[in-house]
Every structure is written in C-alpha cells, then in structure tokens.
Amino acid sequence: MKRLSDAIAMALLSLTLSASAASADASQLYETHCVACHGEQRLGGIGPALLPENMGRLRGAAVQKVIADGRDATQMPAFGQVLSKAEIESIVAYIAKPLAQPPVWGMAEIAASRRIETIPAREQKPVFSADPLNLFVVVEVGDHHATILDGDALEPLARFPTRFALHGGPKFSADGRFVYFMSRDGWVEKYDIWSLQKVGEVRAGINSRNIALSPDGETIAVANYLPKSLVLLSASDLAPIRTFDAQDANGASSRVSAVYQARPRNSFVVALKDVAEMWEISTQKGDFKLRRIKTDEPLDDFFFDPGYAHVLGSAREGAVSKVYALDTGREVAALSLPGLPHLGSGISFVYDGRRVMATPHIRSGLVSIIAMDDWSPVKTVPTPGPGFFMRSHENSRFAWTDSMMSKAKDTMSILDKTSLEIVRSITPSAGKTAAHVEFDRYGKRVLVSVWEDPGELVVYDAETFVEIKRLAMRKPSGKYNVFNKINLSEGTSH
Ligand code: HEC
C-alpha cells in the first residue's frame, strides 16, 4: 500500500516537474520572441495584450495559426519556420493562462501612458463643408481604422488608424466635435472631428469594457475588467482624475461590466459583474460621490427609461431581468425574458399610446416588447434567429434587428412599430453576416454593416427599403451618427 502511494506521489511529482519545465520554456520563448512587441507580463506594446481576458474567443488552434503564419499586412511575424510545433503549442498554453497576480495599473501608470499630439484650437470650425451633425463615425475592426462618413453625400471624409480592437461605442462631446474611442486593451483615444486630427490617447486599463462621458462633458469614465477598477479621466486632456477599486460594501472585488451616462441625474451608473451591487457616481460638482445600490444578484447589462428614473438590468444567465427605481434603489419589477436579452441594444418608442421598450435576445430568435409604465410584456415577436443589435429613429416607423448569432446571420428583420409585426426581411449579402444598423439624423436612411473582412456598408431608404449605395469597409463593427448620439435618440443606445 505504502509503495503504491509512493509511486503515485513520484508520478505526480514528475508530472508537476515536467509541466513547470514546459512553462519555464514557454516563458523563455516568450521573452525571446514576443516580449518586444507584446510587452512585459503580456500587457501589450506595439502588439496587443496577450491575456485570456483580452483574447476572448481567439483560442487554441486559431492562436497557433496566428503564431505560425503571422498576420498579413501587420507587424505580427510568422514563426512557423523559427519555432517547432511543440514550442508554438507551449506558447499557446502559456498565453492562455491568466497572470498569477492582477496587473498593477493605477494613477501613475495611467498618467505615464498619456500622450497629447495636438492641442485643439478653440475657435476651430469644421475643415469640411459637410453637415458636422450628419456625420457617421464608422469603426472598422478589420484593419483597426475609423472612417468619418458624410451622411448626406455618403462619401468618406477621412480614414485614420485606431488602437487595436476598439470596443463598445465611441462617445461624442455635446457639440459633436470630439469623439472618444476605447480599445479592448484599455486605450482611450480622443479625435477632433472638425480638424480631422487625433488629439491624444491614454491607457486607462489593461482590459476594458466601455466608456461614458459625464453629462457636463468634463469627465470620461472607463469600466475595466483588468484591473478591477473604474477610472475617471479629464475629457479635455485625458489626464487621470481618480480610480475606484471595484469592491462591494463588504470588500468583495468585482470586474466592472459597464458604465453609463445618466444625463438627467448628473451621474454615472455603473454595472458590476461579480457582486450584487450597482453604483451611482455623482458628477454634479465634480465630487464623484459614490452611492451603492444593493441588488439581489449581479446585474450586468442595463437599459434606462428616457428620464433615467428606472434601470432595467439582466442577471448573468439572463433568466430574470429586474427593474430598479434609481432614486430609492428599490426593486419595482421582475421580468422573465426568454433567452438572454441584449438590453444594451434596447430601444424605446410609443405604441398604442404607451411608451414601450424593445430588446433583441442573444440566445433566442425573439424581440421582446415591454410596456414601460408597469413593465408588463406587450408582445414577443419571432425573428429568424438570435440577434444582437436593434435600432430605430423617432422619425421612422420601422425598427431593424439582426439574427447574427444564428444560421440566418445574413438577414435583417424590419419591425413595424405601429403593428409590432415583422414586415420585411432584407439580405444585404447572401451568406455574410449582416448586423448593426444606424439611421441618419433625419431617420431617412439606414446604414447596415456587412460584418466581414472585407465587408461593406449598405445604405437603404428607411421608408421604401430600396438600396441606395454600397461602400467597401474592413469589418465595419459599428457606425454612429453624431446627431443621433448627442441628442440621445430614442432609437439607439447611448
Ligand atoms: C514585431 C512585433 C511582433 C512580434 C515580435 C510578435 N508579435 Fe504578435 N502581434 C503583433 C501585432 C502588431 C499584432 C496585431 C496584428 C493585427 O493587427 O491583427 C499581433 C497579434 C498577435 C496575436 C493575435 C492577437 C489577437 O487578439 O488577435 C497573437 C496570438 C500573437 N500576436 C502572438 C505572438 C507571439 C506568441 C509572439 C512570439 C512568438 C508574437 N506574437 C510576436 C506584433 C508582434
């Protein structure tokens, strides 16, 4: 008996030894071949951060392929001739592991990363004649660029490089002059649309989710997974103002899922991924006072009513969504929405004299329509498959949604807001993913992404659904109309 357990112990010991030898080799290989571009502790440099939190769906064989073949037309070299298959496999395993210690990224590191390129002139007028409020900012993740598109002429005005993998929607200053982008690796970039120049950038986190601009336009909040923090930056010069460690009242730490601007409340509302709490941070006098609102369980995807009196949040598995009154912090309703609603893409409109909201679902081919006075279900409308985005405009009778999470990924469905029926299906490009819609400022034209690389923007007449134009784009993940964004159009998320 004793000998058997000794043998097992020996076997276990040699297993651990060989595993740690392999990982020592892998870290050595990383130091030799990758660190120059991907940075100390894999935090990123010229190349993106190589952490599992950042790489998301890119795993296993796909990572092996990137390392062996490199990426065309980028600085990522091919290592297929330099490293053996076993070595590549060991690096893949190495970068799939989270860091042993959470990375340190506080005020000092953020401040040191800040770079200002252009000090914008105050008196600047747009350097182009296009309507500055009917511009679209198109994010092209295929080759990490953004295009500024004239929404009337439907011609690009400028195209410039962005940080790797922009994430979440860009945010605009109240006059529509400046746009702020955030990348998956935590870079916040500021761009002056009127002069078509980049203002500067700062790295506010290592793995980030989204940003929001305060109602007074002075502060940017950044929601981070890594480190677990909310970071406030000055919107004018991107200097860090302060950071909040994301912890609940008992000191349990949490990733920050998202931050939202609550304009009528002069505050940010913050969703926490791992604890049963949400935050409201006052931006009133720049005091940034934190208020904790207890919830039954963590809620991480939010929709607000137009007055920001209530927030609807979905729980992690999406079985139940809860409505809280923001003033009292009390739960006022619980809804069961089938198949993980994507509340962040929810829209609202008036149907039959009542304000309703509509949301697509990530795991079911349904759009849920809910009355916002008593949060009761109004209708569930079937679509060809699970989708992600939904958009409309106050001047349009129709709302558009996709089925991008399904076999019908190439199909857009058009909902008539007066009958709550799907009245048309449109396939911009057969077999190719169609997703993310934005209206122009008048609600007259609709821009749909063919979400591929290379992909396209397809422009339709919002009334007749006739195709107007196609523009070649590199995986246009989103497009944002300046007017609709700064006026908090009811047909779009903010
Ligand atoms: C000369 C700079 C450079 C070197 C050296 C380098 N990389 Fe890269 N790597 C990049 C760049 C730049 C990208 C982004 C390419 C793009 O735009 O898609 C990248 C992308 C990647 C990606 C894809 C990340 C993602 O999220 O899409 C992986 C994985 C990767 N590199 C692994 C490695 C490994 C492992 C090594 C060492 C064996 C290495 N790289 C060495 C520059 C480099």
Image (tube, helix red, strand yellow):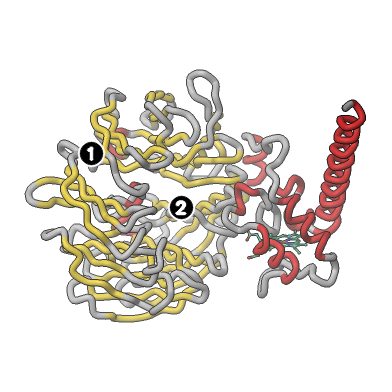
Q: What amino acid does circle 2 point to?
A: Gly
- Pointer 2 residue: 168
Q: Is residue 195 above or below residue 303?
A: below
For residue 459, say whether it is visible: yes
Closer to us: 488 or 101: 101
In the rendered image, residue 375, in percent from the top left (x then y), is placed at: 20, 38
Closer to us: 159 or 369: 369
- Pointer 1 residue: 307
Q: Secondary structure at mark 1?
A: loop
Residue most extreme to the front: 1
Q: What amino acid does circle 1 point to?
A: Gly
Local crowd at mark 2 within 10 Å, few (<14), some, or many (≥20)? some
* Residue located at (34% from left, 62% from top): 385
In the rendered image, residue 345, in percent from the top left (x then y), is placed at: 34, 52
Q: Is residue 91 above or below residue 154?
A: above
The disc, 1 or 2, on the residue closer to the chain's N-terminal end is: 2
Residue 218: quadrant of the picture: top left
In the rendered image, residue 298, in percent from the top left (x then y), is placed at: 43, 32
